[in-house]
Image (cartoon, grey):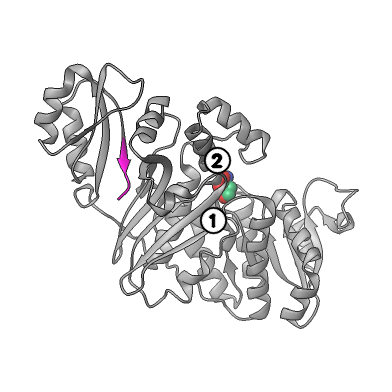
Amino acid sequence: MKIAIMGYGTVGGGIAKVLTANKNKITKVLGEECELGYILDLRDFPEDPFGDRVVRSLDEILADKEVRVICETMGGMNPAYEFTKRILKEGISVCTSNKEVVAAHGAELVRIAEDHHCSYLFEASVGGGIPLLRPFSTTLLHERIDLVTGVLNGTTNFILTCMQRGDTFDMALTRAQQKGYAEKDPTADIEGMDACRKIAILASLSCGASVDIKDVHTEGITKLTEQDFEYAKCNDYTVKLVAQARIAGGVVGAVVAPFLVPKEHPLASVNDVFNACIVHGNMLGDVMFYGRGAGRDATASAVVSDVIDALLHDHEHVFVNLDAVPSLKMDDEQMTHRFFVRVDESEKTKAVRTFGEDISFIEARGVFGEWAFITAPMSEAAFKEALQSLDEVRGYLRVLE
Ligand code: HSE
């Protein structure tokens, strides 16, 4: 059984490592050896044990009819998307970690794979090494999933963990870059885009329709201040970039934003580069997945799990619960949260008038000249309207229940 890797970067190199380290185990599962036949990359890797497999053109790989699975670990939209379509149309399965392509074109690619008796699998695109996606198309299929809540970005979780311990944002980002978690251009992570794609994929798999990333309300972590962390610390909260999707049939309300998370909430103790995801099914209740959300070996392990699935179902289609029918966006009136709000000290009376008597004021060590409070549960729409009547809002966060 021959496979190929397109894009020999961090994850691509990790796949070769997993295939080598666990060769005996993989051979036993498949009943024969899985050979890495080709690596598609523009660079040479003279020191690499698989350096002699590097080719420059996809045609060369497709000409070898023994290749049955290609791992797409190129990242970015193109040429990854175009290459994937070509490969699937040849009846060769594709396994990927590329959430950008999956979030935008996943349903179309699954359909092409089905039409050509092969598979498009993307376990590694969400939650790194956590076996999180496959259950949505297998063991959870009969459940009505109505809520998915997760910490889905390893880089920002690492940064927020450092900030919780006293680092400034810049110090924490530098530390994340030194550790190899954050990219040189960390925009997609810190502005929430990466988590937005991931929750769109999870919500799509939950409802079987396609959730457009434009329908996910997305905020990053760059506006958080030291004061936010001080309030969190003094009031038994932590700050996390939370991705959440409410699902009611084909209607989806999804948000990615920094939340205050109560210390006793299971997501509060998900630290550093780890990810976790809580899935709520109508009969099952809550089930929680936890593990390494980023990093070479863990992510590559998830790709290899897909490779094995595709090889075990060679010339068949492995079902994925994804359909091209677009989901509908939930109204802001139906999306409710408590909100943590900070206003200038001159705004106290107005804040009480606007948000009602049942707001709870909270304090933080060393923060003066302002009032901070947590609202009763209210809709996103009502909150937006209430904010309009205040002049000096210093910031706000949603609060996780
Ligand atoms: N940049 C991503 C993260 C990589 O930090 O979570 C894994 O998807």
What residue is at 74 percent from the left and 74 percent from the top? 26
Q: State whether residue 66 appears in this view.
A: no
What residue is at 54 percent from the left and 69 percent from the top? 112
| SS class, disc 2 | helix
Residue under pointer 1: 127
- Quick check: is the Cβ at mark 1 less than 8 Å away from ligand 1? yes
Residue under pointer 2: 158
**Looking at the image, is mark 2 or mark 1 nearer the viewer?**
2
Rendered image quadrant of residue 125? bottom right
**206 or 163, which lies in front?**
163
Q: Earlier in the sequence, mark 2 or mark 1?
A: 1
- Residue 6 x %, y %: 72, 56
Residue segment shown in magenta? 397-401
- Quick check: is the Cβ at mark 2 less than 8 Å away from ligand 1? yes
Compared with 55, 160 (above or below) is above
Q: CA distance from mark 2 to mark 1?
A: 14 Å
| SS class, disc 1 | loop
Compared with 375, 63 (above or below) is below
- Residue 139 x %, y %: 46, 76
- Residue 266 x %, y %: 42, 54
What residue is at 68 percent from the left and 52 percent from the top? 296
User: What's the magenta bit mostly, secondary-structure-wise?
Assistant: strand
Local packing at callout 1 (Cα closer than 10 Å; few below 14, some 14-19, many 20+) is many
Q: Residue 398 magenta-drawn?
A: yes
**221 or 375, which lies in front?**
375
- Residue 165 x %, y %: 51, 33
Q: Residue 9 magenta-drawn?
A: no
Compared with 318, 86 (above or below) is above
